[in-house]
Amino acid sequence: MYVTILGDQARKQPLAALSLKSGGSSETRLKAGSYLYLEGDAVEWVFQIKTGVLRLTRLLEDGRRQVIAFGYPGDVVGFPSEGLHHTDCDVLMDACLQPYRRAMLESGEGDPDLHRNLLQAALREISAMQDHFMMLGRKSAVEKVSSFICVLADRVGTKIDGHSGMTLPMSRGDIADFLGLTTETISRTLTQLRKSKIIEIRNIHTILILRPTALRGLASRGA
Amino acid sequence: MYVTILGDQARKQPLAALSLKSGGSSETRLKAGSYLYLEGDAVEWVFQIKTGVLRLTRLLEDGRRQVIAFGYPGDVVGFPSEGLHHTDCDVLMDACLQPYRRAMLESGEGDPDLHRNLLQAALREISAMQDHFMMLGRKSAVEKVSSFICVLADRVGTKIDGHSGMTLPMSRGDIADFLGLTTETISRTLTQLRKSKIIEIRNIHTILILRPTALRGLASRGA
DNA sequence: CGGGACATTGAGGAGAATCAAACAGGGTGG
DNA sequence: CCACCCTGTTTGATTCTCCTCAATGTCCCG
């Protein structure tokens, strides 16, 4: 999942289409805290997330970290480049994954539909990443955090007490490393949104959107 | 072209492999300043760059701009998402492109080799973009600019007076919008590198690397 | 109940943005 | 051929956003 501009319908549809040929059999279940793969691993499978949340990260030698993406149901993770994984991937919330052999993506022999669907997922990934460039390169802290909440609400939001709300399985540090900020800035920005009565922080991992329009304004136009 | 960490051999190889089935016939020639496609256009072709330099950009309503990538020989541009282009693409240096029907990427009927090569190009794109996230989200101005010069030298550098050098077909503003900085910061950083005798700015569009090791140090470890 | 990890808050500082002014340098027209 | 202009670049002064460092607070789990 990337923080794209609002109204990204594309990413909502893949699950149904892709799950066609899953066969229902060999799904993978993973506990929170476990790793799916590490940078440098040879790619044998790509996975579509059925339930749960994953985290894709890249590390610099000096410890700086970038969260590349959060993986939510419908997302496909594990695309190879030169046959290798280029991120680490671990589990934030217990997950159920549908594995597909790497060959299904790369050649698709035997199942053209599945092949096409995996390819489309890769192409959507490119487009979503392009949007995220704008986020990282050109948006302020308020815009980043507001966008993040909006997108999360659109993708996995539920109604809570009449408001759109969501649970955040990731830490403030994860959000910071995803948006190119620091833990403290995430915290301060959330506090600021809370004090403006735009959001409610029910508990550390639960956020409600009280004023959606105001939040969307901040997401695209800033403070 | 993205600013990846050094030693990204992957992106150097595609030209030869991909050009296999070009047929030598229908190449596209474009003058500097012309547009290849705009955001929202339907995708009919994807292009591999044979010569020249392209610029891929995305715009925000308020005018903020992000340069998504610079397209150099070997790169493939125009990957569709939901059948549409999601960036603008124009020409910085007169270019010669090899067009491939979108269907060659998406289904590949009739030419499995070409299909696979285009797909691999898309997968390399994903990996390169992931690296660029680190750049945008976590690196300082000096690191960004130094990395940019290093990568450019690796990909399109030539020997000039015994030093590795290159010409920059893009403006300072383009570089700024690519790295998530401002024109002024690019200029200041280049001046700083020049005064440290790490680079020489022969003219506005020509840079020589005087101390490659120092530059690489700045690229990965900062000032 | 106590400990540890994570989150919040605060004070101060650094880095890059912004605003503004001088400076090329290439192209055009006189 | 030269003066001029326009655009893009460099440089300077100042501001502001976000980071850093530090302290306090909170929640979860044993």
Image: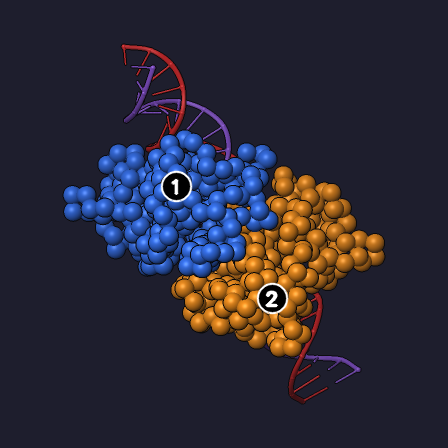
Chain colours: A blue, B orange, C red, D purple
- Dot label at residue B48: 2
Q: Chain of mark 1?
A: A
Q: Return the chain for callout 2.
A: B
Tell me which corner region of the image, top left, top right, bottom left or bottom right, holds residue C7.
Answer: top left
In the rendered image, the residue lying farthest to the right is B161
How packed mark 1 is, by other alpha carbons closer than 10 Å (few <14, some 14-19, many 20 or more), is: few
Q: Residue at x 51, y 50 (%)?
A: A103
Question: Relative to A99, is B98 above or below?
Answer: below
For the point 68% across and 41% down, which residue is it? B217
At x 48% / y 64%, what residue is drawn? B106
Q: Could you say where residue A26 lies in the image, as x and y percent from the top left?
A: 39, 41
For disc 1, the marked residue is: A26
Element carrying mark 2:
strand
Q: Is residue A90 above or below residue B72?
A: above
Residue A218 at least partly seen: no
Asked if both marks, 1 and 2, belong to the same chain, the answer given is: no
Quarter of the figure with residue B13: bottom right
Q: Residue at x 56, y 63 (%)?
A: B112
Residue toward you, B167 or A119: A119
Q: Nearer the viewer, residue B182 or A10?
A: A10
- For the residue pair B131 and B127, the one nearer the viewer reads as B127
From the viewer's perspective, is the residue at label 1 or at label 2 nearer?
1
Q: Secondary structure at mark 1?
A: loop
Residues at marks 1 and 2, CA–CA distance in whole angstroms:
38 Å
